Amino acid sequence: MEYPHVAIRGVSKKFGNFKALDQVSLEIAQGSFTTLLGPSGCGKTTLLRSIAGFYQIDEGEILIDGRVMNDVPSHLRNAIMVFQDYALFPHMTIKENITYGLRIRKTPQEEMNRRLEKTVQYLDIGMLLDRMPGQISGGQQQRVALARALIMEPEVLLLDEPLSNLDANLRNAIRAELRQLQQRLRITTIYVTHDQSEALAMSDSIAVLNAGKITQIGTPSEIYYHPSNKFVASFVGTVNFIEGTIVDVDGQTIHAETKGLPILIDREKFDEGTIKSLERSKKVLLVIRPESVKILDQAQKETTNIFQGEVDHYIFEGSNIRYWIRALDSMIIIDMFDPGETGVRNGMVRFRLDPSKVHLIAI
Ligand SMILES: Nc1ncnc2c1ncn2[C@@H]1O[C@H](COP(=O)(O)OP(=O)(O)OP(=O)(O)O)[C@@H](O)[C@H]1O
Ligand SMILES: [Mg+2]
């Protein structure tokens, strides 16, 4: 990475005897959108608050622009946090809310007006300025909370689940807007969510946290297609896990088997370290996304990686049908896209695992 804008090095934070953050290290590139993703209670807010300077950390260092921040008070860090509940001041107008931080800093009127105009224009909230927080919608409050942070022109923007109070449609719309705004302003952003689809859609980089530790850092596609452990695989998207045994590895193909049946996996996308670790008889977990399995028509002639199972149940989701199929002594989830009105299968089906899309995790 180019010189990291924010660097978190070996950070631990305890509440009493409980370790909320355990040796967390993470580097955040200038202008990037980095998401902290993980289940409730894993330490996301604690890490964000530590970066913002609301918590003293017990171990490690937090650097912004190469400067150690551990003893720098929150208001001098140039990192601004937007809270999940927006925390607007109910007795102030929207305009007073947005300019609050600048007024506290005794910013000259002219400069304040210039920044207000710019921010209001970015977020398209000009018509709200004279109202009170109680007189605007949740989505509008969300924008105002963002405006109140952006007007400070922080180097680092810290967002704690800012969209979680919104309905699904609004969340999708603001998600896209927020990402565009971030890219336009090139503002280094650290975003907290427990919503994996939000993380995949918005981020340059995702850090997955579990129980106070970072378990994987990667781009959305690395996290989705190459989860480094079972936790990440099952937390991000839907997966099938099939236990397998390595039989052989040749120039092109990893040969595995499950329940006595052969499974071929393209070796191409695995690094040499992983390939070396795959000695004969090694047990592995095969990780397969529902969309990477294809239900076959009678006519199709593929001969490898074909299995049979019985449809247990399915749900129609519009763009796809999701099937639960009893096969290989477990329940395999398969998505069939664009099924059409007569697309439903019942009874026994044959399906194929795409050898280029089977991922392996050591167990
Ligand atoms: N001030 C505190 N005192 C004691 N324990 C705390 C405090 N703040 C957080 N914790 C605990 O630390 C752990 C991490 O909390 P944190 O708020 O960082 O989780 P989170 O990942 O943000 O979860 P959520 O998705 O639910 O917001 C939790 O087990 C929580 O109960
Ligand atoms: Mg939280």
Image (spheres, grey):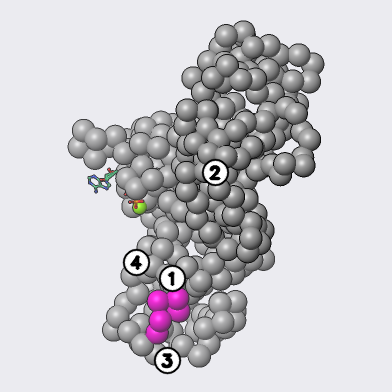
The kind of secondary structure element at disc 2 is loop
Give the camera-side residue of 334 and 217: 334
Q: Position of residue 210 (x, y in %)?
A: 40, 37
Q: Which label lies toward us, 3 or 2?
A: 2
Give the camera-side residue of 284 and 83: 284
Examine the image and state in which quarter residue 176 appears.
bottom right
Q: Which label lies toward us, 2 or 1?
A: 2
Neighbours of disc 3 within 10 Å: few (<14), some (14-19), many (20+)? few
- Contact between marks 3 and 2 (CB within 8 A): the answer is no
Residue picked out by circle 3: 130
First along the sequence among labels 3 and 2: 3
Q: Quadrant of the N terminus?
A: top right
- Contact between marks 2 and 1 (CB within 8 A): the answer is no
Amino acid type of disc 1?
Asp
Amino acid type of disc 4?
Asp
Residue picked out by circle 1: 167
Which disc is residue 85 wearing? Answer: 4
Which disc is residue 347 wearing? Answer: 2
Q: Which label lies toward us, 4 or 2?
A: 2
Rounded to the nearest angstrom, the CA distance separating label 2 from label 1 is: 38 Å
First along the sequence among labels 2 and 1: 1
